[in-house]
Amino acid sequence: MTWIFIATAEARSILVVPIIATAGLAATWLMLEVVQASFLSFGETIRAICILKRFDVLKALHLNLPGDWKEEKALWENVNAQLQWGAADATIKYKHEDK
């Protein structure tokens, strides 16, 4: 919009304003598409990493691996409650390796 106002005030030809308006709209649309594509790609990568490496995260936190999906869901809810909200009532059972 700034360029349109500047072009309107300073242009020596009447064709400059529509050209700048059209080019600005096209550039804005193109940049929006680039940002959306980048975000979708990044989001898919993060989701894939979270799904593929979730047991490595549990091992790094020294947590017992769940036996089934219900246990895993409950475990992640407890871990999230503790890490994100600092919930005191989140029950997380750690495994300690023998030294």
Image (tube, grey):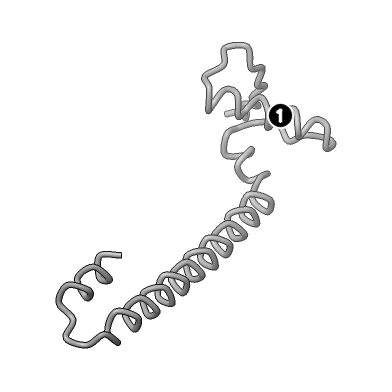
- Secondary structure of the residue carrying tag 1 is helix
Position of 77 compared to 15: left or right?
right
Image point (51%, 66%), residue name: 38
Q: Position of residue 95 (x, y in %)?
A: 65, 27
Image point (27%, 84%), residue name: 16
Taking depth in this image into account, of 49 and 58 the one nearest to the observer is 49
Taking depth in this image into account, of 30 and 93 the one nearest to the observer is 30
Establish if 11 lies above or below 54. Answer: below
Q: Quadrant of the N terminus?
A: bottom left
Position of 76 compared to 36: left or right?
right
Q: Where is residue 46 in the image (x, y as percent from the top left)?
A: 58, 54
Q: Quadrant of the C terminus?
A: top right
Taking depth in this image into account, of 54 and 4 the one nearest to the observer is 4
Which residue is outermost to the front? Answer: 14
Image point (27%, 71%), residue name: 4
What residue is disc 1 on?
75
**Residue type for callout 1:** Leu
* Residue 69: quadrant of the picture: top right
Mark 1: few/some/many CA within 10 Å (<14, 14-19, 20+): many
Establish if 10 lies above or below 90. Answer: below
Q: Where is residue 40 in the image (x, y as percent from the top left)?
A: 58, 62
Q: How many numbered marks, from 0 up?
A: 1
Position of 39 compared to 56: left or right?
left
Image point (83%, 32%), residue name: 70
Establish if 45 lies above or below 57. Answer: below
Taking depth in this image into account, of 72 and 65 the one nearest to the observer is 72
Q: Where is residue 96 in the image (x, y as percent from the top left)?
A: 62, 26
* Residue 12: quadrant of the picture: bottom left
